[in-house]
């Protein structure tokens, strides 16, 4: 059963009524109206302070959700179109490579990012592969 999560407000949903999979219309969040939902194979419970960053197959940022600014100091417009690993100075990009190559989750990665003010911040990152043809990746970044 596919699960969906809104990268912005983190509302989780299950495709019970076919709404989320309705393919002739852009899927958007029923809670906050965010432009798309991210499909997950298994349900996932983000922390309240977790921020989501959705990337394309080249790991360039497509969208950021609530909480990312608080975590990183970057606004949407600072990040969109940039490679996430460079933009956030991810301390290790190998989990993302695995996720994209093998299409598996990599959870609970203990990494560091650099905030806009130049401070290193310790975070836990969960990486999720996109299951559509775009082959992107989503990062769930939680402070620790
Ligand atoms: Zn939402």
Image (cartoon, rainbow, N blue to C red):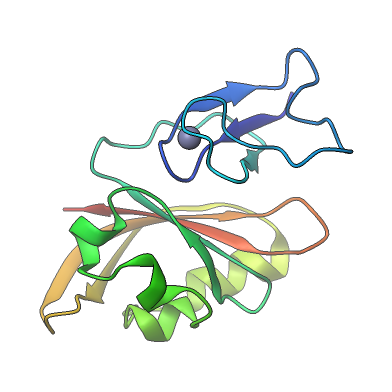
53 left or right of 120?
right
Q: Nearer the viewer, residue 70 or 98?
A: 70
- Tally the marks: 0
- Please tell me in which quadrant of the rendered image residue 110 appears: bottom left
Can you name the residue that lies furthest to the right here? 24
* Residue displayed at 56% across by 25% down: 30
* Residue displayed at 70% across by 70% down: 101
* Residue displayed at 63% across by 45% down: 36
- Please tell me in which quadrant of the rendered image residue 59 appears: bottom right
37 left or right of 123?
right
Q: Nearer the viewer, residue 50 or 42?
A: 50
Instruction: Let me know if residue 27 appears in the view.
Output: yes
Please provide percent x and percent y for residue 117.
11, 80
Looking at the image, residue 107 lies above or below residue 42: below
* Residue displayed at 43% across by 44% down: 8
Looking at the image, residue 11 lies above or below residue 85: above
Instruction: Let me know if residue 93 appears in the view.
Output: no
Please provide percent x and percent y for residue 72.
23, 67
Please provide percent x and percent y for residue 99.
61, 63
Position of the N terminus by quadrant:
top right
Looking at the image, residue 130 lies above or below residue 30: below
Looking at the image, residue 23 lies above or below residue 76: above
Q: Nearer the viewer, residue 38 or 125?
A: 38
């Amino acid at each position: 059963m596919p699960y969906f999560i809104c990268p912005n407000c983190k509302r989780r949903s299950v495709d019970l009524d076919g709404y989320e999979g309705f393919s002739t219309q852009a899927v958007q969040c029923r809670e906050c109206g965010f432009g798309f939902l991210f499909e997950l194979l298994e349900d996932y419970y983000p922390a309240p302070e977790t921020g989501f960053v959705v990337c394309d197959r080249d790991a360039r940022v497509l969208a950021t959700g609530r909480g990312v600014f608080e975590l990183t100091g970057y606004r949407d417009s600072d990040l969109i179109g940039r490679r996430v690993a460079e933009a956030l100075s991810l301390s290790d990009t190998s989990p993302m490579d695995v996720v994209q190559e093998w299409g598996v989750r990599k959870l609970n990665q203990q990494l560091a990012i650099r905030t806009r003010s130049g401070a290193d911040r310790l975070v836990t990152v969960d990486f999720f592969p996109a299951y559509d043809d775009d082959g992107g990746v989503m990062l769930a970044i939680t402070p620790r």
